[in-house]
Amino acid sequence: MKKNKLYLFGFSWYKRFYFKYFIKEYPIKNIIYINPIFKSHFDLALKKGLNKNSDIFIWGKKEFKEIEYFAKINNINITRIEDGFIRSVGLGSDLTWPYSLVIDKEGIYFDPSKSSTLETILKTYDFQSNQELLKEAKDLREKILKTKISKYNTSNHKKLSFPKDKVKILVSGQVEDDASIKYGAMGMTNLQLLKEVKQDNPKSYIVFKPHPDVLSGNRIGNIEEKTALKYCNEILIDISMSSVLDAIDEVHTMTSLTGFEGLLYSKKVVTYGLPFYSGWGLTLDKKTCERRNRNLTLDELVCGVYILYPRYINPKTLEYCTPNILIDELEKERKKINNNIIYKYKSKVYSYLSRLTQKIISMVK
């Protein structure tokens, strides 16, 4: 067990309910959440014992200048935390627990300005020497295609029909104030992306799928329907990403996970920012990263992204598990919601109350 005290910055109140299960190497008594009201983060941390022997975790790319300076002068490595790529049945913005997280000691996967643990894995890991692991990655990829599991798993599966005589392009919308857009797409907007795709592909059939967090009203990035339809042929809502990927030929995206999932579905993927899956010889990239100078197979990429990088916990036992086991549990949860009217109603009520509570809190602030 870790003897150092762990100080957590930028973790919302609800994250403390689940985060402890992802860091079992720390005793509960050594985990200190710093959520100040009257004191600064730094002052409160010092009061609670922060010193040069402490460990520091920060959620995502949130900035804590005093904390980061303290870590630098005391030679403390900052670890950054973010949701994993197979997350839950439900949106994070609805306060649904995640069952995978990434714990990155170098940077974070969506910030290409510096290397991350994921990038180091993809650059240096000797995949070919571990054929068993590559077989696991292949099986995992096939399981994802079979179950149609994605990150949030909130939308319904439908059979789509698009014009057969045109190249069908999916443009994946994103949350515009998300850190992956700020760092990986240099602040590009969904409308800018749509315009560029339309300009470069005037004869293609373009479908636009807004991000579920934007559709829910929890996050920003909405494009008015009449504006979006100037640059696309169709807008898709309340339909699973897997259903769309089954029906299109290409994915065009800034940094969305949809681009990575497009690779799983053997689609042509064009990136307009610098997502974690670009630069490895599998995508067509508008921007490049000099550090990424290695070509990977799809199973090698899947191995790094899904198996070696994140941590997973079993929704039932809250013990560590493999992504294969998590997919099984998420599939059971999704079927339960779809087949049990009462359970489905409870899930909708939870989402509604969560959104309402967050709006009230934001108005009070």
Image (tube, grey):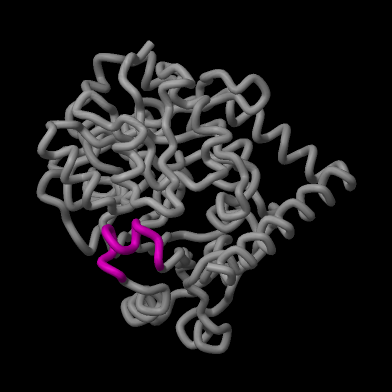
Residue in view at x 25 percent, y 67 percent: 186
**In the depicted structure, whether residue 81 falls above or below residue 290:** above
Q: Nearer the viewer, residue 88 or 6?
A: 6
Residue in view at x 54 percent, y 79 percent: 233
**In the depicted structure, whether residue 105 falls above or below residue 346:** above
Residue 217 belongs to the span the image colors magenta: no
Extreme residue toward the top, this view: 1
**In the depicted structure, whether residue 250 falls above or below residue 188:** above
- Does 113 sit left or right of 19 as displayed? left
Q: Nearer the viewer, residue 132 or 72?
A: 72
Q: In which quarter of the view is residue 311 placed?
A: top left
Q: Nearer the viewer, residue 339 or 34?
A: 34
| x and y percentages locating residue 84 in the rendered image | 45, 39
Q: In which quarter of the view is residue 30 placed?
A: top left
Q: Nearer the viewer, residue 53 or 326?
A: 53
Would residue 296 be visible to someone looking at this image?
no
Q: Quadrant of the N terminus?
A: top left
Residue in view at x 34 percent, y 82 percent: 199
- Does 124 sit left or right of 195 as displayed? left
Residue in view at x 22 percent, y 49 percent: 66
- Does 143 sit left or right of 170 as displayed? right
**In the depicted structure, whether residue 192 falls above or below residue 364:** below
| x and y percentages locating residue 52 in the rendered image | 19, 28
| x and y percentages locating residue 109 in the rendered image | 30, 44
Residue 184 belongs to the span the image colors magenta: yes
Would residue 114 be visible to someone looking at this image?
yes
| x and y percentages locating residue 235 in the rendered image | 58, 74
State which region is magenta: 177-187
